[in-house]
Amino acid sequence: MESETSATLTSAKNKPFTAWTFLLLATLAAWFPICRPYLRMADDFHFAGWLLTGGPMVYFHEDGIWRMLGHELANGATLINPVLQGVLALCTHCVATLLLFVALRRLLVSEFLPLVLALVFAVFPWGGTALLWASGYTYVLGTALFLAAICVLLRAFPLKNSVAVALCIACSALSLFAHEALFFALLISGGFVLLREDASNGKGRLALAAAPVAGCFIWWSLYKVFPGRMPTEHIKLNPRTLLSGVYYQYTNLWIFEPWKSQSTRSLLFFDWSWWQFGIGIVLVCAVAFAIRKAITPSRHEPRPGNTDNRMLVFLLLLVVATVAIYAIGGGFSLDSRKKYPIVPVALMFAGYCIDRFSKKGHPHPHLRTIILPTLVLVGIATTWLQIGLWRYEAVRLDRLVNFLSTQPDPALVQVQWDSRIQAAWPHADQYWGALPEGWVLADAVRLKHLLAPATEPAQQARGLKFDPIQFTWVPIR
């Protein structure tokens, strides 16, 4: 009897590590294709130009501390080594996934549900451009630091209260130095402490609950002192954004639309090399092996279900708070990078609802064997497709910039973009939100001249069109 009890306890203790391994391998399998030489898009060109001509202080002089941490890390990585940006984004996303899993395990009673929800966040490209685009990395870093603060508030780590307070302040402030999107969510995140801990902890409980507010105050103070040259805009309150930002989360389903067209499906493995196929096969096999252990439930007595309706209301407010910044910042747009910070909080709320109202604490074993493999296969394939579509447009833009940089006056060239992706996937522009415009091409050409000055200009072209068969830009005669 004692040996059986010991085995049960060992199984329960080892279960989180098995789940972490599975989540890590699944995340790597889904997103490893971004770890190749990065091709810049949109805002990347002027951020990289600032860093190239004057280093970090030029960015600080121009934009102050606004998103400084995220922009300088990602765009600086592209200048050091083009592969580093993808590695940086992937590693940060892995950390964010594991932190979300830890937070869900502290918040929910169910053993299986945190794994499912963390997997949904990990392998699907809900906030695709946040990982694909260097200038979108700010959302990934800000979200990872936000989730770290949440884990501290949920007492997920065995820390002294003073250390927990200091760490929570640091994570909150650094999250905002990366991106301000979660400012209002951090302001109210101390509710986790107030709702989960009784008043017997006294000052320690209140100090930890106030830590995110202190982090927000630090960032706000420095933002006001060091605004850079950014124009100061009057705050225009738009309360409808609080609802529309939540309502329009259904547009996350746009990620599946490219599967409907052969024109976009054919780009699933666009620009893949043999080594990428090899790594993909190895990682998928590793995930298949790890999923067998992740599916097996650990044997322990079920805990009582969640009955605190106050936490349910608080999590709903937290979801609304993730979009509140757009109510004073010009409105919520539908580009996917802005959804990246919203998704993990929405998953917390959805998980708590299921945990609160579900009658069964654990799904049937046969249901486990269906849910996880299905999520893994659909998520990885959809992410690979989105990466292929983005890469296709990035390569086209890179070759366009190479051509324009040889022109005596690039501004005179009329470009017919004519993308097969936009034709097959009507929501591509809204999902990406980083398509080339006139100012983008001008910044791109200037950066190209800085990195590799043209030796001799070519004959001036009047216009350009793309030849998809030769995959090159040709002059219009």
Image (spheres, rainbow, N blue to C red):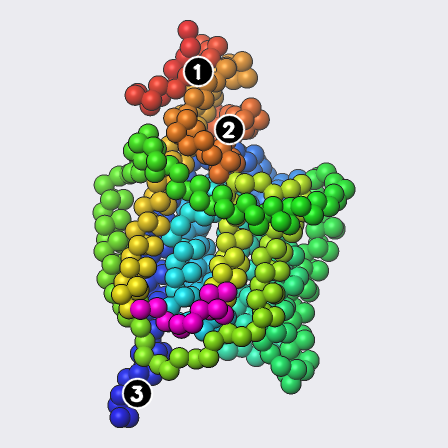
Residue 262 lies in what quarter of the image? top left
Q: Secondary structure at mark 1?
A: strand
Residue 362 lies in what quarter of the image? bottom left
Q: Residue 254's x, y, as percent?
A: 44, 41
Q: Residues within 10 Å of mark 1 (few under 14, many from 20)?
A: many
The numbered disc on residue 436 is 2
Residue found at the far top of this picture: 477
Q: Residues within 10 Å of mark 3 (few under 14, many from 20)?
A: few
Q: Note whether 430 is above or below 324 in the view shown.
A: above
In the image, is residue 221 part of the stretch drawn in magenta? no
Query: What is the span of residues highlighted in magenta in the rendered image?
Result: 353-364
Q: Is residue 37 visible?
A: no
Cβ atoms under marks 3 and 2 closer than 8 Å: no
The numbered disc on residue 440 is none
Q: Amino acid at mark 2?
A: Pro
Q: Amino acid at mark 1?
A: Leu
Q: Measure the alpha-carbon separation of dots 1 and 2.
A: 15 Å
Q: Secondary structure at mark 3?
A: helix
Q: Amino acid at mark 3?
A: Ser
Q: Residue 144's x, y, as percent?
A: 51, 58
Circle 1 residue: 464
Q: Residues within 10 Å of mark 2 (few under 14, many from 20)?
A: some
The numbered disc on residue 6 is 3
In the image, is residue 361 part of the stretch drawn in magenta? yes
Lateral position of residue 339 relative to residue 387, left or right: right
Residue occupying image coordinates x 33% and y 64%: 21
Q: Measure the alpha-carbon separation of dots 3 and 2.
A: 61 Å
Residue occupying image coordinates x 42% and y 10%: 476
Lateral position of residue 222 relative to residue 451, left or right: right
Cβ atoms under marks 1 and 3 closer than 8 Å: no
